[in-house]
Image (tube, rainbow, N blue to C red):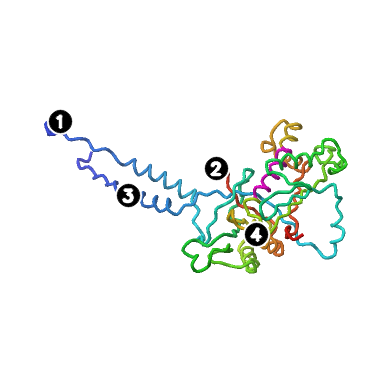
């Protein structure tokens, strides 16, 4: 048995050192989450195939316009943004098979079967003077409409909300309710 | 205090502070893991627009950022208050986007290039004209996967 004790190390300064490092990371850290609305831009049109693409049936398109004063037009009427979601939902589902609303095409979805998929396309047009916030709000409403339709479909057929489905099921839902938002070529709506 | 001086012979046992450093280290590791060192210095003010249907960016390392907004206060005397585009560390014009995208592509591995996302971080008051120009340029560079940065509306 050693009678001499080894002197214990003085560890009180480790805390200080750690604090210094902590302060450094606290200052440099950015905790902002990178969130947003994801989109896929259409590729630049090929000169050769331009004419074919142009021909989309009139009834399958809803044109949503935002003018330079951030006012909204959907279809052919001025609309408040709070009503846009329901209008788009009605347009995409076409519950009464109205001839002025988009047609549906029986499509065979792998792993699910036949489902009448709407051919509706939402065409979003904006003016150069539109504010970004207004544009994002409209985009947001459009996405919300689609998301609600997908949730509805998912609940009806799988008994769960869209986000809780497995990847395969999500793909099925995405095929059944496509998100066709066309951002078109920029135009000066005011000058049209 | 009078209490202690009366029983002068008994010494107060020192509080062990050895666990203090452990606690601080734990904090430290938390911040080290969550931290993301700021790559660029902001030269434009970006007050992101609000949207409720936002999704998270899956691969942060594959994102390139385009900042659009007014120059920050200290630079306004020099650059004015018109919305400007910031790429990396400096003000650029729409035509520079092509080089920027090419450089970003180059820095990614071959397999990851197709997943590259361009995140447009624009101020909410920017006019769409500027953003349309950027979008058109991105289409020309075939950087088609984009994300409009937005944040959750504050309640």
Instruction: Kindly identify which chain the residue marked by label 2 belongs to.
Output: B
Pinpoint the chain carrying mark 3: A
User: Could you say which disc has been placed on residue B83 in the image?
Assistant: none
User: Which residue is drawn at the image coordinates 42% and 44% (left, top)?
Assistant: B27
Which range of residues does the magenta coloring cover?
A: A135-150
**Chain that bears disc 4:** B
Residue at position x 50%, y 61% from top? B72
Residue A159, how many percent across, how many down? Answer: 72, 30
Q: Measure how far apart labels 4 and 2 are at the Cα level.
A: 24 Å
- In the drawing, what numbered circle is on residue B131? 4
Nearer the observer: mark 4 or 1; the answer is 4
Q: Which numbered dot is residue A16?
A: 3
**Dot 4: few (<14), some (14–19), or many (≥20) neighbours within 10 Å?**
many
Q: For the point 53% across and 68% down, which residue is it?
A: B79
Mark 4 vs mark 3, foreground winner is 4
State yes or no: residue A143 in magenta: yes
Task: Give the residue number, with chain letter if any, for mark 2.
Answer: B154
């Amino acid at each position: 048995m050693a009678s001499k004790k080894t002197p214990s190390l003085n560890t009180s300064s480790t805390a200080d050192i750690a604090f210094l490092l902590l302060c450094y990371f606290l200052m440099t850290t950015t905790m902002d989450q990178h969130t947003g609305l994801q989109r896929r831009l259409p590729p630049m049109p090929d000169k050769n195939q331009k004419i074919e693409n142009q021909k989309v049936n009139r009834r399958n398109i809803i044109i949503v316009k935002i003018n330079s004063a951030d006012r909204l037009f959907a279809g052919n009427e001025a609309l408040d943004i709070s009503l846009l979601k329901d209008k788009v939902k009605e347009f995409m589902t076409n519950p009464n098979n109205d001839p002025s609303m988009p047609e549906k095409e029986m499509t065979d979805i792998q792993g699910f079967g036949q489902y009448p998929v709407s051919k509706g396309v939402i065409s979003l047009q904006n003016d150069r003077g539109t504010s970004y916030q207004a544009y994002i709000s409209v985009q947001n409403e459009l996405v919300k409409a689609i998301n609600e339709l997908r949730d509805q479909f998912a609940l009806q057929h799988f008994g769960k909300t869209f986000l809780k489905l497995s990847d395969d099921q999500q793909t099925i839902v995405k095929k059944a309710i496509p998100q066709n938002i066309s951002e078109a070529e920029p135009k000066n709506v005011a000058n049209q | 205090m009078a209490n202690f001086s009366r029983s002068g012979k008994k010494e107060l046992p020192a509080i062990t502070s050895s666990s203090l450093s452990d606690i601080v280290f734990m904090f430290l590791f938390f911040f080290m893991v969550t931290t993301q060192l700021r790559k660029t210095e902001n030269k434009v003010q970006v007050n992101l627009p609000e949207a409720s249907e936002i999704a998270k960016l899956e691969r942060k390392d594959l994102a390139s950022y385009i900042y659009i907004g007014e120059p920050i206060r200290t630079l306004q005397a020099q650059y004015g208050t018109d919305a400007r585009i910031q790429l990396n560390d400096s003000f650029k014009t729409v035509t520079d986007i092509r080089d920027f995208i090419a450089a970003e592509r180059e820095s990614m591995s071959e397999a990851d290039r197709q997943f590259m996302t361009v995140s447009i971080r624009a101020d909410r008051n920017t006019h769409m004209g500027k953003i349309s120009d950027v979008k058109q340029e991105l289409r020309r560079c075939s950087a088609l996967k984009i994300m409009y940065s937005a944040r959750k509306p504050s309640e």
